[in-house]
Image (cartoon, rainbow, N blue to C red):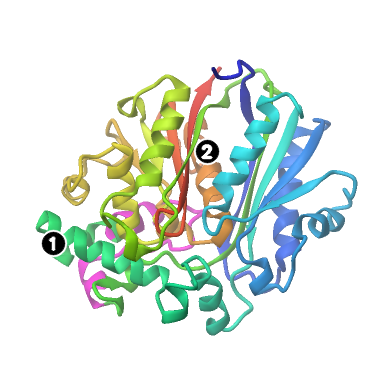
Amino acid sequence: MFNTTEVYIVAHSLVPGSRHYEKGLKELFAEAFLKVLDQVGNANLGAIYVANAFSEVLQDQSVLGAYLMDYVGLRRIPAIRIESGDGSSGIAVLEAYNMVKAGIYDCVAVVGVEKMHDVINVKLNKALSTITDYEYEGFFGVTPAAQAAMAMKEYMIKYGYDYEDLAIWPIKMHERGSKNPLAYMKKQATLKDVLESEVVADPLRLYDVAPAVDGSAAVVLCNKPLKSDAVIRIDGIGVGAYGTYTGQRDSLTELYSVRDAANMALRMAHVSISDVSLAEVHDTYSILGMLALESMGLVRPGETPRLLSAGTLDVGNKLVINASGGLKSMGFPGGASGMYELALMVMELMNVKPFESLGRAELGIVQDMAGFDLVSTSIVLRRVG
C-alpha cells in the first residue's frame, strides 16, 4: 500500500556539460544548487542528496556532501552523498523521494555533480573501470565499452542487423542535439560520419559513445506545490537490480533491472507503458539506449532501429524518445547523468525552452542505470495544474 502523500518537483536547474576547466567540483555543485535554492525561496530544505560516482578517484575526496555544503555556507543542513556508479542520480532521487513521502522532510534537494576532466585519460579510464566487477572483469581489462560492444554484437546477430542499421541511434541523437542549445554535441551526424569514426570496441564506434563532460543538475522535491501554475508530480518511482558480472548473464539483449524498475514505477503510478508520451533513457552507449527502450516495453524487442529509421519516435509522434538528444548529445557527466535526464524531462513536460515543439505532453518516464544492468531506476512524471 503506497503512502498517499504526493511528491512534486518544484525547482530544477542544469549546468550544460562541457570541459569546464575554469570550474572545480564545488563550483559546479554551487551553480546548480544555488539556482534551485533561488527558485524555491524560503522552502524548508531538510536535507540535500548529492549524486556523484567518482570523487574518490578523480578528486581524491570522500565525505563529499559535507564539503560541498560548507562551500555554499549551509553547514547545518545534512548532505548525503549517494554513489551507485553512473546510476547514482536515480538512487539519490529515490532516497529523497522516500524522505518526503514518509513525511520526514517537507522539501529535499537532489544535486548530481561530476568533474570528469582535469585528469589524464588513464585516470579517467581507471575511474570508469570501477563500474565493472574489478575482481572478475576490470582487472583483466574489461571496460564498460567492451560490455556494450558485446551486447551490440549479440543484438545484431539475434535480430539480423548490420552495424549500419544501428548507426541510426547516434544519427537521430545528434539531430535532436543540433536543435538543443543545452547540448554539448550540437552538430548533426551523417551515416558516413558514424561509419568512419574510430572503432572503440568492435563493433562499437566513437559515435556510439556519449562524450564525458563536467556537469551538474539539481531538483527540489516537496510535499506540495510552491506555486499555483503547472508543476511536475512524481507519480511513480521504481528500482531494479541484476547485480552480476557480464559472464554470468543469461542474455546481453535484455536489461532485467530496467524492466523491473519500470514495472515498479508504472504500477505505483497506476498507468501502463503505453500511456507514456516522453522518455529520456540512459544512452551512455547507443546500444544501451535501444535495450532500455525494449526492456521497458516502450518498443518491441528488436524493433528500435526500424522505428527510429521510420521516424516513428521523432517529435510529433505519440511517443518521443530523448527529445534532448540524450546523453549522446548532452554528454556523460558520470553520476550526474540521471539528473541531466530528470531536469530535461521536467523542461519537456513544462513545455519550456528549448522544448516548446513537444506540445503539452502529460506523462513522461526517466530511466537511469548503473553499469551494465546492475541497478536501475525509473521515474514516472506527470504535469499537473
Q: Give the amino acid type for the residue marked by disc 2 in the picture.
A: Met
- Element on which disc 2 rests: helix
Quick one: label 1 or label 2, which is nearer the N terminus?
Answer: 1
Residue 8, image x and y in percent?
62, 27
Query: Circle 1 sits in a helix, a strand or a loop, which is it?
Result: helix
Q: Residue 319 placed where, x, y %? A: 30, 34
Q: How many marks?
A: 2
Location of the N terminus by quadrant is top right
Q: Looking at the image, which is closer to me, 382 or 88? A: 88
Magenta part of the chain: 171-196
At a point 55% along the width and 45% down the height, the residue shown is: 90
Query: From the viewer's perspective, is 10 left or right of 107?
Result: left
Q: Position of residue 337 (x, y in %)?
A: 53, 54
User: Could one spot residue 150 in this view of the protein?
Assistant: yes
Q: Residues within 10 Å of mark 2 (few under 14, many from 20)?
A: some
- Quarter of the figure that contains the C terminus: top right
Q: Is residue 188 magenta?
A: yes
Q: Where residue 159 sits: x, y (%)?
A: 12, 54
Dot 1 amino acid type = Ile
Residue 347's disc is 2
Residue drawn at x 83%, y 31% as measured from the top left: 42
Q: Residue at image x 27%, y 41%?
A: 313
Q: Which mark is residue 36?
A: none
Q: Quadrant of residue 28?
A: bottom right
**Which residue is depicted at the point 9% across and 58% down?**
160
Residue 218 among magenta residues: no
Using the rendered view, name the quadrant where residue 156 is placed. bottom left
Distance of mark 1 from mark 2, alpha carbons?
Answer: 38 Å
Residue at the disc numbered 1: 157
Q: Residues within 10 Å of mark 1 (few under 14, many from 20)?
A: few
- Position of 109 compared to 268: left or right? right
